Image (cartoon, grey):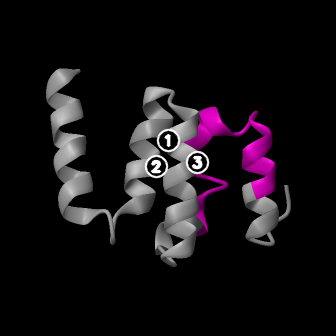
Amino acid sequence: MKAAEQRLDELIAKHADDSAFQISQVYAWWGDRGKAFQWLDRAYAQHDSGVAIVKVDPLLKSLRPDPRYKAFLHKMNLPE
């Protein structure tokens, strides 16, 4: 896991402005909902095209039961 964390740190350092959605996917997969939602919000603010698949992305499945997921869909004007 240490190597994966190092790679994520590198991704954040180099691509925080253009890969926020992918970073949120990693945190969601790792079960860190708080950071996943922080990065989803950042992706939304940056107009990251990845947010278009938020409802069908299997890597974000762990976020669906969280009330913040419903709020995020509402912010995007997507049906639940």
Secondary structure, mark 2, is helix
Residue at 38%, 51% (x, y): give it.
Answer: 23
- Quick one: which residue is furthest to the bottom in this view? 47
Between the C-alphas of marks 1 and 2, the distance is 7 Å
Compared to residue 1, the image places residue 22 above or below, namely below
Which amino acid type is shown beneath numbered disc 1? Answer: Lys
Q: Which quadrant of the rendered structure holds the N terminus?
A: top left
Between the C-alphas of marks 1 and 3, the distance is 5 Å
Q: Which mark is residue 37?
A: 3
Expressed as whole percent of the image width and height from the top left, the position of residue 53 reads: 58, 62
Between the C-alphas of marks 2 and 3, the distance is 7 Å
Q: Which residue carries the number 2 mark? A: 24
* Whether residue 58 is visible: no
Is label 1 in contact with label 2 (beta carbons under 8 Å)?
yes
Taking depth in this image into account, of 13 and 50 the one nearest to the observer is 13
Which amino acid type is shown beneath numbered disc 2? Answer: Ser
Taking depth in this image into account, of 9 and 23 the one nearest to the observer is 9
Which amino acid type is shown beneath numbered disc 3? Answer: Phe
- Say which of marks 1 and 2 sits in front: 1
Where on the picture, by quarter, is residue 64?
A: top right
